[in-house]
Image: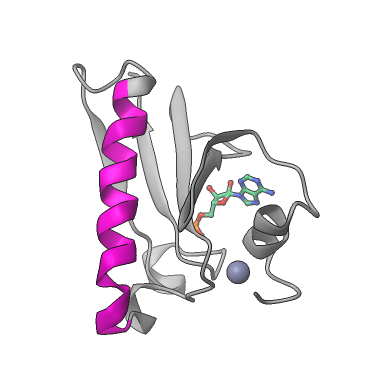
Amino acid sequence: MVEACVFCQIIRGEKSADFVYDGESVVAFKDIRPHAPVHILVVPRKHIRSINDLLEADTIIVGEMIFRAGEIAKGQGISGTGYKLVYNVERGGGQFVFHLHLHLLGGW
Ligand code: AMP
Ligand code: ZN
């Protein structure tokens, strides 16, 4: 856990968020500034800065994130129409929150 990290604060319950999933290794909540009718962030409980910082042992977490995104998409009723799964990596890749997260965007 990183003190000043906004996603760690959400995971610790110090900051509110609209959760759609709360699991053992991964949580998911609605993006506060949605870029799509459905915009959900799938976030590991473990603080990992970005895809650049993954350890081989973290691949199980990334697998869980992607699997969970698919399940959430089904739950949100957008799996049929389709959606995007996006990892922004570092500033040039559009990353602003430096706690790994997967954007689930859909519902168009
Ligand atoms: P990225 O640009 O990939 O780092 O995306 C970070 C995302 O986190 C943005 O889409 C923000 O709108 C979203 N975000 C930032 N703060 C919060 C928050 N407190 N609750 C929910 N989403 C947030
Ligand atoms: Zn964090």
Q: Is residue 61 magenta?
A: yes
Q: Position of residue 88 (x, y in %)?
A: 38, 61
Q: Residue at x 63, y 59 (%)?
A: 7
Q: Main secondary structure of the magenta part?
A: helix
Q: Locate the C terminus and report the quarter of the image it occupies.
A: top left
Q: Residue at image x 21%, y 17%?
A: 81
Q: Is residue 85 magenta?
A: no
Q: Is residue 85 above or below residue 76?
A: below
Q: In the drawing, does residue 98 fall left or right of residue 14?
A: left
Relative to 31, is 57 above or below? Answer: below
Residue 75 placement (x, y as % from top left): 36, 21
Rendered location of residue 77, percent (x, y): 32, 15
In this picture, residue 93 sits left or right of residue 100: left
The picture places residue 104, in percent across and down from the top left corner, at 37, 39
Dividing the picture into quadrants, the one containing residue 96 is bottom right
Q: Which residues fall within the magenta stretch?
A: 55-74
